[in-house]
Amino acid sequence: MLRYTISRLLQAVLVILVMSLLLFMLIGLMPGDPVENMLEGNPSLTPETMAQMRALYGLDQPVYVRYGHWLYSALHGDLGYSSVYFRPVLEVLGPAIVQTAKLLVATEIISIPLAMLLGALAARRPGGWTDSLISLFAFASISLPGFWTSLILIIVFSVKLGWLPASGTPLMGDASLSEQIVHMILPVTVLTFFHVGPLVRYVRASMIETLNSDFVRTARAKGLSESAVIIRHALRNALIPMVTVLALGFGSLFSGALVVETIFGMLGMGKIIYDAVSNIDFNLALVGLLLATIVTLLSSLLADLAYAWLDPRIVLK
């Protein structure tokens, strides 16, 4: 298991290095001039000044030289400055990471128990009306576009009813807890809706298979009630593989959070990355996208390790 873990960690580090190079090259191909964008509106801007600024930021050097300098600095803890915020990249991303983490944690806290409940109810009588309604909800969750659902909720609960704010989420310390919760209701609702559908389908399928197992028939033959059979025997066994499903689903959940933050104007990772790409903020866009890639890779790595822990034959292979 230790050798397998080290091997997977080394593979993840190699993938991160390759992705950092690809992102560095792709962001460098974005249209627009970062120096011109940085000095926009400056009446004293001359071609000589722009050339000096490009030389100062190393933009006149080949891409592999610039990547080498960036990688060396990044490995020593210097991820560069934001050309829009005029602050170190980590200072800009720090509060955004906290905002995104709040959104993801709230979504997981709601999604996991909800998926377990709906999946277990659907599996009790496959083909019944309860199963049909829950399956319809799960298919809608998987099929509907995220931006469409977000706009519908904004129109209904913010524009028509005026119950909830449509955008913006105060940073930690800038508002009371109740105000922050109110601002997060719509984004968390949208993200939970899209996250819970696949989980419900998986819990349902796993529960149906488990309920047809011999040990469940034995538990029923002992005279246990149906709720006791489901909660104490079937659900526990059906949820063991859920560990890996949740780990694999975290990457897509994080990607969905980036979209939801942009739509609802939350100052999270998604909004920061969107603004950085729009304003040609090279360092901020690069580090933000690289962090998003690393989160996805780590979730996949945790899924592989969980699988290996649950089924040691994977390690042997």
Image (cartoon, rainbow, N blue to C red):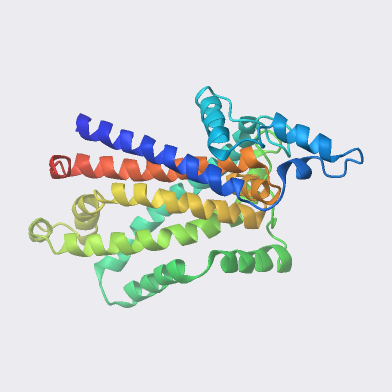
Look at the picture and state if 295 lies above or below 202: above
Dividing the picture into quadrants, the one containing residue 17 is top left
- Front residue of 234/224: it is 234
- Front residue of 186/254: it is 254
- Front residue of 92/10: it is 10
Look at the picture and state if 81 lies above or below 187: above
Viewed as shown, does residue 289 lie left or right of 247?
A: right
- Front residue of 295/10: it is 10
User: Which residue is found at the position 29% from the left and 77% from the top?
Assistant: 128
Look at the picture and state if 178 lies above or below 88: below
Q: Check the image and name the residue furthest to the right.
A: 43
Dividing the picture into quadrants, the one containing residue 123 is bottom left
Position of the C terminus, as image quadrant, is top left
User: Which residue is found at the position 60% from the left and 50% from the top?
Assistant: 29
Viewed as shown, does residue 161 lie left or right of 256?
A: right
Could you say where residue 173 lies in the image, as x and y percent from the top left?
68, 33
Could you say where residue 191 lies in the image, as x and y percent from the top left?
51, 56
Position of the N terminus, as image quadrant, is top left
Viewed as shown, does residue 120 lie left or right of 282?
A: left
Dividing the picture into quadrants, the one containing residue 133 is bottom left
Could you say where residue 300 lies in the image, as x and y percent from the top left?
35, 45
Q: Is residue 254 visible?
A: yes
Look at the picture and state if 252 lies above or below 157: above
Could you say where residue 281 lies in the image, as x and y percent from the top left?
67, 42
Q: Count the marks.
A: 0
User: Which residue is found at the position 69% from the left and 58% from the top?
Assistant: 166
